[in-house]
Image (cartoon, rainbow, N blue to C red):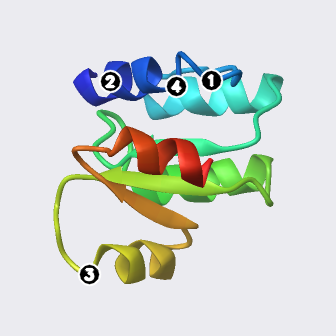
Amino acid sequence: MKSLNIIKNMLKETKMFVGTATTGEECLEKIKFGSYNLVLMDCHMPDITASELLIRVRDIVPDIPVYAISSIPMDEEEFYQSKGFNGVLLKPVDSKLLEKQF
């Protein structure tokens, strides 16, 4: 929840509409009934694994870019891309990098 608020605050100054969800099911409901250009997904959702949520998001909107947000430094980019994510942002998220990338 803390990283959700941090990223939302980082994007406050942009002209982007930022929708948030605290569970995987809430995320899926918002995607079904809303219009989004991008999903930033924390890899530690309380009710579903990130890989399973990614599959379900892509079932609804196949071409939407989905980026993982993680604090576990391993070969992040390669690992998450092998799972189907478009990329990964490591915590703590750099606000300047976030704004440039999106």
Q: Are marks 1 and 4 in contact (CB under 8 Å)?
A: yes
Q: Mark 3 vs mark 2: which is more N-terminal?
A: 2
Q: Separation of disc 4 and disc 2 at Cα?
A: 9 Å
Above or below, 85 relative to 19: below
Q: Which residue is mark 4?
A: 11
Mark 4 residue element: loop
Q: Name the amino acid, label 1.
A: Thr
- Residue at image position (63%, 33%) is 28
Labelled disc at residue 75? 3
Q: Amino acid at mark 3?
A: Asp
Mark 3 residue element: loop
Earlier sequence position, callout 4 versus callout 2: 2
- Image coordinates of residue 73 in percent, x first then y, are 17, 68
Q: Which residue is mark 2?
A: 6
Circles 4, 3 touching at the beta carbon (< 8 Å): no
Give the Cα distance between marks 1 and 2.
Answer: 14 Å
Q: Which residue is mark 1?
A: 14
